[in-house]
Amino acid sequence: MKPKEPSNTSPNLEAIADRPEALVEAIAARQLLSPWQFYRLCRQTCQAWGCDRLYFGQLPLALSKSFPIRELQRFFDALAIPVGQSCIPPTSTTYHLSAPGGHRLTLRVTYVGSGVVGRVVKISQLNGESWAFKACFDPQWVWQHGIWAEIPIGLYLRSQGVGQNIARFQAAGLTWMLWEWIDETEKPENRPGLPYETLARREHLTRLNPLNTSNYNPHGIRLDPGGIQVNSWGRRWRDGVYTLGFYWRRFQTVGWRFLNPHLNLKSLRYSLRRCWRLIRGR
């Protein structure tokens, strides 16, 4: 399916011309782009503009009002390297940022956890707000999880007003993503926005996988949107092939130790239940 481009009468054309990634954002807001569509649009945009970095969404006002946006983006680009590429989890660190013009910002980065796809750290202002920062182990691999899948998902869900039972997308580069921080006490009934299921039924999107409890807070708010896509024929076979490709690339990079965090009874139980659901076509 070819992505729908904004019409020439769009009131946002002037804004689109200001940023290389703005046209991609406008398209992603109108339809859920597949990871491969999104990757292709980003590659074409980089070639057309002669750039190698794109930034999506809007950084939280609590950050952007006190520190230059470009400097924050550069900081997150740099932070994505130890978070996503290091062989060991990052340690908790306090960063004291400074920029020309007397701008200063202190951020606390706390390790949260690792999954198959990447790592998450919590970024906090001292006595202020917090956000979930995610960097992927293999950001170049295009599949139904990770950077190329979750950025268009986040842009689309935000444009459709979805947020009652799923974390809201904030901003991203091509190696990192910043999401709303969901704590253990937050409940869907106290949050504005549509539940994801309403949009999924209307647009024929895949259902959320309830089996992986690590992707939810205790009250059922989804923390990770990876895997959401249009529910099309043959999707499971394609997903399986790309998943095997991801595992093979990880094995070539770090060997079998990439599976160490998942060699436990909880992961085994999840895998068996997941396989059974797939066999039953659910």
Image (spheres, rainbow, N blue to C red):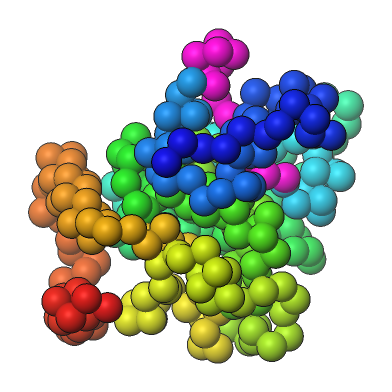
Instruction: Judge by depth and name the residue closer to the eye, 78 or 143.
Output: 143
Q: Quadrant of the image for the C terminus?
A: bottom left
Q: Is 123 displayed left or right of 214 in the figure? A: right
Q: Residue at x 50, y 29 (%)?
A: 42
Number of marks: 0
Q: Residue at x 58, y 75 (%)?
A: 198
Q: Is residue 48 above or below residue 29?
A: above
Q: Is residue 102 above or below residue 156?
A: above
Residue 113 in magenta stretch:
no
Which portion, as a residue range, is magenta?
Answer: 45-58
Q: Is residue 4 above or below residue 54?
A: below
Instruction: Judge by depth and name the residue closer to the eye, 104 or 144.
Output: 144
Residue 83 location (% of width, % of height): 44, 47
Residue 19 location (% of width, % of height): 71, 25
Question: Could one spot residue 261 in this view of the protein?
Answer: yes
The quadrant holding residue 115 is: bottom left
Q: Is 114 displayed left or right of 182 in the figure? A: left
Residue 270 location (% of width, % of height): 23, 80
Q: Residue at x 32, y 46 (%)?
A: 143
Q: Is residue 257 above or below residue 249?
A: below
Residue 216 location (% of width, % of height): 47, 78
Instruction: Judge by depth and name the residue closer to the eye, 273 or 120.
Output: 273
Q: Residue at x 88, y 26 (%)?
A: 101
Residue 47 in magenta stretch:
yes
Q: Quadrant of the image for the N terminus?
A: top left
Question: Could one spot residue 254 in this view of the protein?
Answer: no
